[in-house]
Image (cartoon, grey):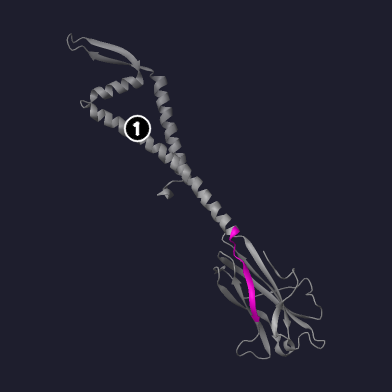
Amino acid sequence: MLAFFSNRNAIAGIAVIFLLFAIAIAISLYFPYGEYCSKDEYTNAKECASYHIALVFFFRFIKSSNDYGVAITALATLAVAVFTGTLWWAAAGQYDLLKDQIQLAREEFTATHRPKIIVHGMDVKLAGDGEFRHVNFRYVNAGDTDAFVTLIASHILWTKYSMVPAGIEFRRHEVIKKPVPLPSGKNGFAITPDDINFTSLVRSGRGGHDTAYCVGVVVYRDKNDIERRTGFCRRYDSERERWLKADDEDYEYAY
């Protein structure tokens, strides 16, 4: 029902009301007075008097009806129509205001209860893998509202330093043509385009061997269409045989 009311309807209603007022004012200015006549019931003489045109119309309307109840009903109906039009006009404005408030509330809720994607479960042990394996991981929406994933990119590199060098170029995973919805609490699975030598991975960081890193980013949007990113940087610990978070805020972040 409220969907019926719109800015266009409100403007049309205002225009009609102003038009009626303009017509009434024009008639009053052009025909300010009119003559109303009646006959004496005894002498049958005709007596006339000048009244404002609005009163003349009212008197003739009452006289034309033998049933005063009908006249009163008609006037009451007119009053109800005017009152209904006023309510309609007010409701149209209230609907626009309510719609804006609802939209603002939704945006504030999404901003406060935003989605937040985290990366975990990084591994290389997939069934059927050979000497060269791809790294796989899961990305989870740990936030309160839905996320819409638009891009996943990563890169595997080897370095003898304890920090990942700057300016790394990521390789895009499969092309996402349409944002992939990720509801709160749900997860997705990703496999890196880069592969890694499993024997070298086992020796990672030992005996002068370079350390393996997997760096990447998950790009997504919230319901307000605001773009957000989760960057990750994992260092392979050959002693624990697991990927650990690197202490590098340039690659481990979420915003």
Q: How many marks?
A: 1
Residue 146 in magenta? no
Figure quadrant of residue 186: bottom right
Figure quadrant of residue 34: top left
Which residue: 47% across, 40% down? 11
Q: Is residue 30 visible?
A: yes
Vertical order, 240 against 148 (above or below): below
On the image, numbered disc 1 is attached to which residue? 79
Vertical order, 97 against 248 (above or below): above
Which residue: 40% across, 20% down? 30
Question: Magenta stretch?
Answer: 112-122
Q: Position of residue 7 (x, y in %)?
A: 48, 44
Q: Position of residue 185 (x, y in %)?
A: 55, 70
Q: Position of residue 31 (x, y in %)?
A: 38, 19
Q: Is residue 224 visible?
A: no
Q: Amino acid at mark 1?
A: Ala
Residue nearest the viewer, comparing 177 with 231 = 231
